[in-house]
Amino acid sequence: MPGVNWDDVAGLEEVKKELREAVNQHLTGGRTQPRSVLLYGAPGTGKTLLVQAIAGEVDSLQFYRVSSSDLVSKWLGQNNERVREVFVMARTHQPSIVCLDDVEGFCGAEGEAARESARMELLMQMQGALEDNAELLVLGATAVPWRLDYEVRRSFERCVCIPMPDEHSRALIFKQQLGRVLNSLTEVDFTGLALRADGFTGADIACVARDALMQPVRKVQRATHFRRVRGQRYNQVIEEDDLLAPCCPGDTGAMEMTWMEVGEELAEPVISIEDVLKSLEDTKPSVDQRYHEEIQKFTEEMQMSPEVSSSKTEITK
């Protein structure tokens, strides 16, 4: 996707390295790297961003990104055609990448004929690309890998677990999210936020940051008094005198007025650590302990299963 690159993905260095190697092998015609990779992990940990980074970094690869919901229809027969069409286009324009979001959508309850036909077509196309030595990389992504049946799991040569962000990554995500606006946060502040955000996904932290950006706006809207300050107008880099900022009624120079009366003289608010802490306190992690246990159980089962060993599937954490 235009505008997204590897630097936009905070942390996940080992995962990025592995995906780079897999993509580079396809660019150079190598065959030592897997040609099908399953990315699994909690929602909001970066699976989609990783896929976007691949598409944004490699112009010479044709990229086809679809969701299982795009390919699975309730009408029997249409599913085969949709799945086949994606792989035909990818094989026609090699080297290419097919990314399957929510790949668990191909695995429905027994008896769902339409979904089963799409699953069988997917397996057949992936196997055909492998046998034909096609320059085609298939990436699958799922937040619920335990819903994949044995055959679908086995079709991926490598499984890569996308972990929750560690402390260093959480600090980087806060910096990425808040670095584009005026803020007074220090390195110590970012370190403290990372510690407090233990158990948060990258998407959770982005949600905290978005809410923190609204904290000064709420202050402006609630303010009954403003005073003259030196600062920057919105979307400007040059500081000016005589702009207006909210203040307490008893502050020196306080003038009673509403934010609607301030207009374009409003100084752009500076995001403070207090703003971010307030938003962090009001936000709960989206991933609960039960989910962590399910992911851990799945990973351990995959590592220990003789079926995994026989299919030469590798697990990366």
Image: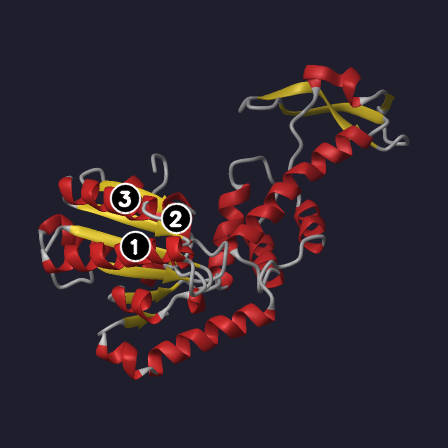
Residue neighbourhood size for the residue with mark 2, other residues' Cα within 10 Å, grouped as few (<14), some (14–19), many (≥20): many
Residue drawn 33% across the image and 53% down it: 118
Residue position marked by numbered label 1 in the rendering: 139
Q: Earlier in the sequence, mark 3 or mark 2?
A: 2
Label 1 – label 2 distance at C-alpha? 18 Å
Question: What number is the disc on residue 247?
Answer: none
- Image coords of residue 182 (percent x, y): 58, 35
Q: Which residue appears farthest toward the right when viewing the image?
A: 250
Residue drawn 43% across the image and 47% down it: 74
- Image coords of residue 243 (percent x, y): 70, 20
Which element is circle 1 on?
A: strand
Confirm or deny contact between disc 3 and disc 1 (CB under 8 A). Answer: no
- In this rendering, position of residue 291 left or right of residue 4: right
Residue position marked by numbered label 3 in the rendering: 81
- Name the residue type under label 2: Val
As drawn, 227 above or below 216? above
As drawn, 63 above or below 158? above
User: Which quadrant of the figure contains the N terminus?
Assistant: top left
Q: Earlier in the sequence, mark 3 or mark 1?
A: 3
Q: Nearer the viewer, residue 10 or 143?
A: 143
Residue drawn 67% across the image and 32% down it: 269
Residue position marked by numbered label 2 in the rendering: 72
Number of labels in the image equals 3
